[in-house]
Amino acid sequence: MTCSKTGSSTKWWLTRCVLRLRRTGEIVAAYPTLVATYERMLEAHTKERADLRHSLRVGPDEDVMKAIAQKTAAQTKILQAAVDMRKLEKETFHCDRQRMESCPT
């Protein structure tokens, strides 16, 4: 962002330098707004992370990814047990029905 005269007229060169300085000033003037925005984003992400750790019951030194993997594995086992139980109920119902049909009334 240096302003150096490179074979152009002095007026053009000065105009360019002024425009560059003005743009730089506008960018610098936006810094407090940007910093405030990034601070709010950081606060939101920090809160989300704390909420996730709380819901997973993970301590500050424990790995969140490992806790998620363990929770997923536990949920998968529970769902598989429910599926197995439904299959057993279906088979039992089918066997009872066959017995009932074969029994003389």
Image: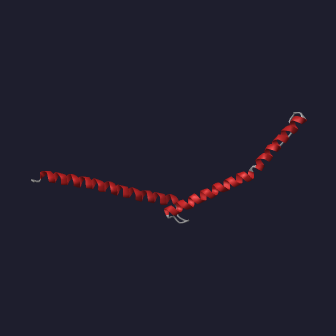
The picture places residue 43, in percent across and down from the top left corner, at: 63, 58
Residue shown at the point (48%, 58%) measured from the top left: 68
The picture places residue 31, in percent across and down from the top left corner, at: 74, 51
Residue shown at the point (32%, 54%) measured from the top left: 83
Q: Residue furthest top?
A: 8
| Front residue of 82 and 13 | 82
| Front residue of 65 and 71 | 71
On screen, residue 9 versus residue 42, left or right, reads right
Q: Which residue lies furthest to the front in this view?
A: 105
The answer to whether residue 5 is seen in the rendering is no
Q: How many labels does the image show?
A: 0
The picture places residue 40, in percent across and down from the top left corner, at: 65, 56
5 over 105 or under it: above or below: above
On screen, residue 33 versus residue 43, left or right, reads right
Residue 82 sits in quarter: bottom left
Residue shown at the point (61%, 56%) measured from the top left: 44
Q: Which quarter of the image is occupied by the N terminus? A: top right
